[in-house]
Image (cartoon, helix red, strand yellow):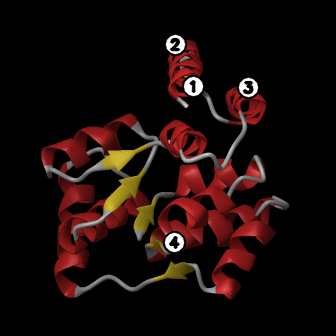
Amino acid sequence: MIVADATPLIVLAKLDRLALLKQGYGEVLVAPAVYDEVVDQELAKGALEVAFIQRAVEEGWMQRVQLTGGEQRLAERLVAHGRLDRGEAESLAMARTRGLRLVLDDKEGRVAAGAFSVHYLGTVGVILKAYGKGRLEHGEVVGVLGDLARVLWTVPDVITEALARARRIRIRT
């Protein structure tokens, strides 16, 4: 089980790789603000990939969950005193209190997760883990990482390092 923030969900849906989360982690928990961002707001924009996210929720492996009172209070403090948006704050609060890993790409969110000792990974990490587990072939991971650079602003060094890691994984397997 894992908690997912909005950007990885949107990006993986755009890449038609949302199933990597199901394959790698089973259940994916989504905070209310994240659900609103990835479904309601994206639907209003006419984003076609929303259908993948809605299907995942209908199938039950992705779940929109309500925050506990403690999670809500922590999220409110994170928004008021930090640089996180509501979705990142809710996701971080859920991951921390439930002892789950968090998938997020935002730099400020990663810094906050580290400060709260929440284990996290980004979209690139999800892709590399899937490759390491044999869920993607080498050519697929190269293609997905290339596509990732088109749908998510990523520092070129991140993609270069991810490709280097994929080569190292390939050598070991």
In terms of secondary structure, where does tag 2 sit?
A: helix
Q: N-terminal of the two: label 1 or label 2?
A: 2
Residue tagged 1? 166
Q: Nearer the viewer, mark 1 or mark 2?
A: 1
Residue tagged 3? 146
Question: Contact (CB < 8 A) between labels 1 and 4?
Answer: no
Q: N-terminal of the two: label 1 or label 4?
A: 4
Viewer-nearest residue: 173 or 31: 173
* Residue 86 pos. (x, y %): 39, 62
Q: Residue at x 52, y 27 (%)?
A: 169
The kind of residue on which mark 2 rests is: Asp
The kind of residue on which mark 4 rests is: Gly
* Residue 41 pos. (x, y %): 67, 65
Residue tagged 4? 26
Q: Residue at x 64, y 81 (%)?
A: 57
Estimate how packed mark 3 is, as few (under 14), some (14 to 19) or many (20 or more) residues with alpha carbons within 10 Å. some
The kind of residue on which mark 3 rests is: Gly
Q: Residue at x 78, y 53 (%)?
A: 16
Label disc, if present, on residue 93 of the rendered structure: none
Estimate how packed mark 1 is, as few (under 14), some (14 to 19) or many (20 or more) residues with alpha carbons within 10 Å. many
Estimate how packed mark 4 is, as few (under 14), some (14 to 19) or many (20 or more) residues with alpha carbons within 10 Å. few
In terms of secondary structure, where does tag 1 sit?
A: helix
Residues at marks 1 and 4, CA–CA distance in whole angstroms: 23 Å
Q: N-terminal of the two: label 3 or label 2?
A: 3
Which residue is situated farthest in the front direction here? 173
Viewer-nearest residue: 169 or 25: 169
Residues at marks 3 and 1, CA–CA distance in whole angstroms: 13 Å
